[in-house]
Image: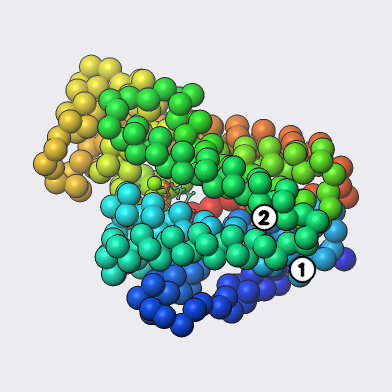
Amino acid sequence: MMMNLKEVLNQVNQTIVELPYRPNPVELYEPIRYLMALGGKRLRPILTILGGHLFADTWQNWLKPAAAVEVFHNFTLMHDDIMDNAPLRRGKPTVHEKWNNNIAILSGDVMLVQAYDLMLSVEDKYIRKVLTKFNVCAAEVCEGQQLDMNFEQLPTVSEADYLEMIRRKTAVLLGFALELGGIIANGSLKNTELLRQFGENIGIGFQLKDDLLDVYGDAEKFGKQVGGDIIANKKTYLLIEALARAQGATKQTLDYWLQQKDFDKTEKIKAIIGVYNHLKIKELTENKINYYFNLGFEQLEQIEAEEMRKSVLRQFIQQLIERES
Ligand code: IPE
Ligand code: IPE
Ligand code: MG
Ligand code: MG
Ligand code: MG
């Protein structure tokens, strides 16, 4: 039976809308409903289902574990927005802006619990394996987030350190989402391991694209504050490459803006984008994005599954390379 992606997205959203919440205090649960209802691409639960669909057709049985991954993702976003001082998420005020930091911390905490609760819905025979892998993934996401925070304070960061940071904060969750699908669809160890590696590579490409959109995206489509990474001196791929390449007056401009404590945000964003344009950082980043997506596609090739099933996944991933939101 061939998979209809629209139908998958509908059912994922339906599962999320119907998630039960305890009745009170409403201050704890309302922000969760708010953030979850803002939507987003629902990329990770779809990956779980497409990963499983390589090996079986019973995807309607995987909606809860798929939702678990999405709730976990949204928990990380709620806390990430506090850490990044972000005003907007999915085109609307962030939870800590609309309510306050304490609400965003505690609502996020309970989302993590909810994610684990949903994950318990996998068949008994898979529980230990799934939770063990989920634990490693969740710890790595926190490690990546701490590295991201540490790097903001450093004058520069190596490309290798940056890649390891984004592997942990972003890529391992895409890897886990896919591997989870493979496991609960009874895929072989070899195939589920390839799925994880595939997910990590496209996850690195995905975060590189996020860094790119943070500078060159259309604010309306992106739904987040464009230039937020520049304001925070975030050590993105773009900034790291600019720091490695800038010379003379360009280097002076870059250093000047990185050192300013009190500045006009719009002015700083404009100046840094000027440096990026001059150094052709956009093209460089696009090449790197393609490199990691292609690495991922090579692993997808090696997975033993029907070509038709792999092509559904390939086409879905292809859209992520070109995404604007
Ligand atoms: C945002 O994730 C955080 C990153 C890892 C870049 P998404 O871009 O998947 O956000 P939503 O869920 O679609 O809003
Ligand atoms: C987020 O990276 C990764 C996690 C949420 C774990 P970003 O900080 O770049 O994500 P956005 O841009 O706020 O969505
Ligand atoms: Mg962040
Ligand atoms: Mg952020
Ligand atoms: Mg970002």
- The residue to which callout 1 is attached is 61
Quarter where residue 242 is shown: top left
* Lower sequence index among marks 2 and 1: 2
Identify the residue at horizontal 36%, vertical 59% (top origin). Answer: 105
Q: Position of residue 91 (x, y in %)?
A: 38, 65
Label 1: which secondary element: helix
Identify the residue at horizontal 49%, vertical 79% (top origin). Answer: 22
- Towards the viewer: 105 or 196: 105
Identify the residue at horizontal 80%, vertical 56% (top origin). Answer: 125
Task: Give the label on residue 47, or none.
Answer: 2
Amino acid marked by disc 2:
Leu
Q: Split into 4 quadrants, where in the image is the N terminus?
A: bottom right
Q: Is 322 on the left or on the right of 311, as rendered?
A: left
Q: Is residue 314 above or below residue 23?
A: above
Q: Is 4 on the left or on the right of 249, as rendered?
A: right
Label 1 lies in ligand 1 vicinity (Cβ under 8 Å): no
Q: Residues within 10 Å of mark 1 (few under 14, many from 20)?
A: some
- Towards the viewer: 85 or 260: 85
